[in-house]
Image (spheres, rainbow, N blue to C red):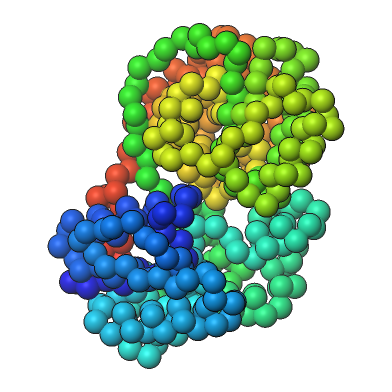
């Protein structure tokens, strides 16, 4: 294969894991002498070398914006050997349609779960991904579920980041194993040395988007209970999103203005420094398929307590997991990290993890599937 089209919905300078994923993958394929073209939403991209990029401005209204995007995918796909779409609908749907027209192989990577996320963000009662599908709620999404079904059944290969999500799709969309594959997210240890924590106060760190599925109201309640155990704790919430002002109001209403700090999005280097400075990290999301923040914390041997509704439990069974719908479960798990012996043993376990997944590894796995 010599020409690859990457269709994505986000790309730097937009901030976020999916944007960085698209950029790093494009760079790695180009290093392997593959001609890469990227189509995305957005404008004002930073200069790139080794591949081309074209975007669709977000000033266009929905519908028209998606039509323009589909046209750009159509135009770029003429010379491509394969199309790799990095989300299910915004990039995946036009990629599948264009792939059928040109008879190009299409791979779609599922990094999240669009239907479940829409359900939770609409203000419905919190429900995990597993229960969302067990209760058949994906079918109630009508036209959106029809489009997802169309995409997953018409694409050539579906790429998941965990077996957990892959098995859900096989079960509920009637897929065969032959068209599904798992390519785990990047994981590179940043060292095995352990250092005693000497910061004062003790910082508990969360980083991500301020959205409902991140369960931040729940986290505020957990933290308030932890303060009773140790008044020297500070909770840092880093990121942006539509729920940020509501969370700020909750913090004030709970009288936690001095103990909870809000910060903006950080570049990766700054986030890594903040992780290293933290006492432990916390991720109470209702569900997380393959959370980059958790993987980054583990790579620095930083203790973390996270939702048990996640696909990385198979890879890292020894992490500290808790029920994201039970305050007692999450509080009990987080409180364990206030015990020095437990903390030290947990950190030692993290330091002994030897698993590794690099960008060259990932590119090779994609190429193996494309060239089948």
Left or right: residue 257 versus residue 103 is right
Counting from the top left corner in percent of width and height, residue 228 is at: 78, 15
Query: In front here: 91 or 249?
Result: 249
Counting from the top left corner in percent of width and height, residue 148 is at: 58, 74
Left or right: residue 184 versus residue 145 is left
Residue at 55% of width from left, 50% of height from top? 289
| Quadrant of the snapshot with the N terminus | bottom left
Q: In this orientation, does residue 314 appear?
A: no
Query: In front here: 267 or 353?
Result: 267
Q: Is residue 345 above or below residue 181?
A: above
User: Residue reaching furthest left?
Assistant: 33
Count of residue discs: 0
- In the rendered image, which quarter is residue 186 located in? top left
| Quadrant of the snapshot with the C terminus | bottom left
Query: In front here: 306 or 224?
Result: 224
- In the rendered image, which quarter is residue 357 located in? top left
Residue at 71% of width from left, 78% of height from top? 142
Counting from the top left corner in percent of width and height, residue 201 is at: 61, 13
- In the rendered image, which quarter is residue 219 located in? top right
Counting from the top left corner in percent of width and height, residue 254 is at: 83, 29
User: Residue reaching furthest bottom?
Assistant: 101
Q: In this orientation, does residue 124 appear?
A: yes
Left or right: residue 109 versus residue 248 is left
Left or right: residue 363 versus residue 282 is left
Residue at 72% of width from left, 12% of height from top? 231
């Amino acid at each position: 294969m010599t020409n690859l089209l990457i269709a994505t919905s986000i790309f730097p300078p937009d901030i976020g894991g999916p944007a960085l994923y698209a950029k790093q993958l494009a760079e790695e394929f180009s290093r392997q002498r593959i001609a890469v073209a990227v189509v995305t939403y957005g404008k004002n991209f930073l200069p790139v070398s080794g591949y081309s990029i074209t975007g669709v401005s977000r000033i266009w209204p929905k519908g028209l914006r998606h039509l323009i995007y589909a046209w750009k995918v159509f135009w770029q796909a003429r010379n491509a050997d394969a199309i790799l779409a990095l989300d299910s609908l915004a990039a995946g749907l036009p990629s599948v349609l264009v792939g059928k027209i040109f008879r190009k192989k299409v791979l779609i990577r599922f990094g999240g779960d669009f239907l479940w996320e829409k359900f939770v963000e609409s203000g419905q009662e919190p429900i995990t991904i597993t229960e969302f599908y067990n209760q058949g709620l994906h079918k109630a999404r009508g036209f959106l579920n029809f489009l997802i079904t169309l995409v997953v059944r018409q694409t050539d290969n579906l790429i998941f980041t965990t077996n957990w999500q892959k098995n859900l799709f096989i079960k509920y969309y009637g897929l065969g194993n032959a068209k599904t594959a798992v390519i785990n997210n990047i994981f590179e240890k940043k060292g095995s040395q352990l250092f005693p924590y000497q910061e004062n106060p003790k910082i508990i760190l969360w980083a991500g988007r301020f959205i409902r599925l991140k369960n931040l109201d729940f986290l505020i309640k957990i933290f308030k209970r932890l303060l009773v155990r140790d008044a020297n704790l500070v909770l840092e919430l880093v990121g942006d999103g539509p729920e940020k002002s509501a969370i700020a109001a909750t913090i004030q209403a709970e009288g936690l203005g001095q103990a909870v700090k809000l910060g903006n999005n950080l570049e990766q280097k700054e986030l890594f420094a903040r992780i290293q400075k933290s006492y432990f990290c916390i991720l109470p999301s209702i569900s997380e398929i393959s959370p980059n923040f958790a993987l980054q914390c583990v790579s620095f041997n930083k203790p973390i307590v996270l939702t048990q509704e996640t696909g990385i439990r198979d890879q890292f069974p020894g992490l500290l997991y808790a029920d994201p719908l039970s305050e007692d479960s999450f509080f009990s798990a987080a409180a364990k990290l206030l015990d020095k012996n437990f903390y030290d043993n947990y950190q030692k376990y993290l330091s002994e993890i030897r698993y590794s997944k690099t960008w060259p590894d990932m590119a090779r796995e994609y190429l193996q599937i494309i060239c089948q």
